[in-house]
Each structure stands twice: as C-alpha cells, then as structure tokens.
Amino acid sequence: MTEHEASSLLRAVTASPTQKAGLPRLVLGGSLAGLLLVSLGLILLYVPRPAPFQAREPEQQQQQQQQQQQSPRIHPPAVHPHEKDLLSQIAVDLSPFNDSRISSGISLQQVERVYCNNDQGGFRLQIVDGRMYSVGERHGIQTRVRNTKLIFMHLMHQYKLPDVDISWVSVDDVVMDLKAGRSNDCPEHGPVLVMTKQPHHDHCIMYPDFTFWDWEEAYAVPWQDMPKVMGDAAAREPWKNRKEKLFARAFNLGEARNTLKDNEGELAKHPLMDARIIDWHADPGSFVDLQDHCSNKWLLHTAGNTYSVRLKYLLFCKSAVVLPDSPWQEFFYHMLQAGHNVLRVDALTHENRAMHLPAVADYLREHEEEAEEIGQAGAAFARKHLSSESVALYYKGLIESYAGLMKFKPTVHPDAVPIDKSLLNDFARPFHERTCNVCPRT
Ligand SMILES: *[C@@H]1O[C@H](CO)[C@@H](O)[C@H](O)[C@H]1NC(C)=O
C-alpha cells in the first residue's frame, strides 16, 4: 500500500480531512471514553511540539497531518522490508540475563527459585551429560506437556545438546510474581520458558508451543504433515476461484474474539464479511476445517485469551492473513511484516470493529494484487520458517544460547525422572513435595 492509498482509505471513512491532525482517529475510534483517553494519550505522546518562536510552513503542517492520519487502521508496509533472522528473538528474550554492565548470566539460585515458587503446569528440563530429565512435573492442559516432551526428545536424537537446567511452563497466560520467594540465598528470579508473552514480560523466554508437535484436541494432523496438508489445500483453490470474504471462525474465547459477536448483525450485513465466533458446545456443526479456510481470499486472525495458535495454519493458505494488533507474541511474530506477509491492522475493539472490519475487507478487494502477494508471501514465510525443521533449529538455538549464559554446571536434581520414563507413567507431583534445598519453597 502506498502512503497515498493509505491516507485515501482513511479519508474515505473519516468525517472530514480538514479536521485537526489527530482528530480523525478519535472520530473513527468511536466515542467511548476509554478509547478517547487512549487516543488522546497517543496524541499527547506523539504530536511533536511546534518550535516555540517559529511559524511553520503550510506544507510542513500538511505533511505532519498526513502522517498522523496514517496512524492507521491498516498499517502501511515497512519501507525497506528485509528478511529478519528468526533466531534473533532468542537474544532479545534472554537479554535480561545478558547484561555486560553487571555480572550477568543465569545462576543455580535463579533456576531453583523459579522451581520452588512456580506451581503452573509444566516441568523443569535438565540435560546432564547428554541425558534428559523431567523434574517436578505439574499437570498441564490437554496434551501440552506430553507433546513438548516429545519435541525435546526428538531434539535429543537429532542434535548434540549442551547441559542445561531450565523451567518450562505449559500455560499461555503465565502469571509470574518476580518478587515471590526472594530470600538472602536466592535474591533473583530466574528465566522461564513460555509459549507466549507480552513485550514487557522479561524473564519469559518464548518457545515454539506444543502444536508444533501435534494438536490432537483440535483434530489437527501432526505438525510435520501440516505444511503439505495445508499446501495441498491452498493449491486446490486458485486465487481467482476464492471467495471475496474476510473470513473467520473462532471459539468464543477472550476479549478480542468477542469483538466478533454480532448480535445486531452489523458485520453479517456487509457482503465481504464472513466472520463468526462459535460456541464450542452450542453449535459444533458450524466448525470449518482448516483446509476449507483456504477457499477465501482473506483470512482474519483473532487472538484468544492470550495468543492463538491458529495464525500459523492460516498463513499456509496463500490467502491474505489479516492480523490485528495484540500485545501477545509468539517466537516468530517479529518476522511478520506489515503489507508484506500479513496485513497488520489496529487492534479490534467493540467500538471500532463494525467500521474497522468492513473497511479492511473493502481495502482488500480494492487491492487485489497486493492481497494475492501478501497471501503468497505469508505461505512462503510459513513454509520456510515454521516447518518442523526450522522449529527444531529454533529450539536448538534457544537451548544453546541459554546454556551459554549458565554460570553453573547442572547436576541431576533429586526430583528428576528420565524423560522417556516420565512419558510412560504419571510422575506429576504435588507442589509441596518438591525438593527445595537451595531456595525456600513458597
Ligand atoms: C549476549 O550479549 C553479547 C554482547 O552483546 C552478544 O554477543 C551475545 O550473543 C549475547 N548472548 C546471548 C545468548 O544472547
């Protein structure tokens, strides 16, 4: 999308282009006080103050106005798109433990403190002298724990991995109290592997989640087979045959999803919209196979309570994936570039969605070629970076980088169970039975 197109799109739906810079955004966003405050906050933050004693040129003013009108519902493409490095996220996540100005690194005390404080689903993973252990397992949701163990075991067979001692959790809405369990012996909180986080959640290191092994609960085929399954589905639907619909089916889970609730039929009446949320129990008949998503030109992704695993499946379709802003990230989101492999748009809210979504759909229809290119690039990205092989390399890089920051050589913990044994029997143990010899258990 060119700058001009972006601003004309905005103009098409704003009241008047002559309004003061910044104002259209407020008008667009609806009139709810909360949103007004947020927008106002943004304006206050971002409007550069005019130089005190200097009259500004009209062109300059106009330029500024244009720039602010483009703080957009549809994010303009990066000017110089470049292929980033998938693994670069690892260093970002580990940076709180890699500060050269202080004596940094990961200590046994930090790892023990997490172990003796964290009762969320998951386990502590140890690799000692080439053997892998699950330590102090807690039950996780569905098959998350098992599938992640299978990923780790697969890695062990593929690569020579360094010794490591690392806490892993299977919940997506990690609640970490960084102050909990502080003692003289254990003054600092350690790192935790999580499947999703917000940018400010430091101490959280993102890992590719259990669905990169399998997602039985959703009747998905194993991830290893998914690129072919979705690739074939995409190939069966040439672009010109695809429906002109901004399509979404999603469970009624979380704030972002609920913006698709359409009691008044505002969304349904727009001919380019086909977005619905589904009640898991009430209407199981309205499920749509992942492969069948590919018969639409445009696919809307919505986050669930936190993130949603479905984004990666959608990317394989060669449809243009519309990605509303969300603070929740996965390990690969830094690779998703506005206007190149996804169409990034402002976050959905109850106030903006009735205008926002149809405007996005209209835009996509008017920009046929761009939409098709985004679809192609999204699928190319997924094939290259989200394959089982690529995910294994991410894990390998993560474990190696983490090990490189460890200031101790791990020894087998008293609660450790060889990981293959832990798969066969139920070794999950109550939190209070955990052995805590270094840091107090809380
Ligand atoms: C830690 O920081 C140094 C210096 O910035 C960098 O070279 C190194 O790659 C970092 N290590 C990790 C594991 O991120």
Image (cartoon, rainbow, N blue to C red):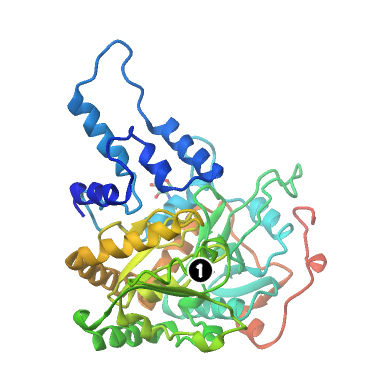
Q: Which residue is mark 1?
A: 262
Q: Is mark 1 within 8 Å of ligand 1?
A: no
* 211 in relation to 344, above or below: below
Image quadrant holding the N terminus, namely bottom left
Residue 371 image-quadrant placement: bottom left
Q: Is residue 341 visible?
A: no
* 204 in relation to 305, above or below: above
For residue 383, side relative to residue 177 (left or right) = left
* Spot occupied by residue 87 in the image (x, y as percentages of width and height): 37, 60
For residue 106, side relative to residue 91 (left or right) = right
Q: Amino acid at mark 1?
A: Asp
* SS state under label 1: loop
For residue 407, side relative to residue 51 (left or right) = right
* Spot occupied by residue 16 in the image (x, y as percentages of width and height): 30, 41
Residue 290 image-quadrant placement: bottom left
For residue 298, side relative to residue 105 (left or right) = left
Q: Is residue 187 visible?
A: yes
* Spot occupied by residue 262 in the image (x, y as percentages of width and height): 51, 68
Image quadrant holding the C terminus, namely bottom right
Q: Nearer the viewer, residue 36 or 289?
A: 36
Q: Residue at x 23, y 49 (%)?
A: 8
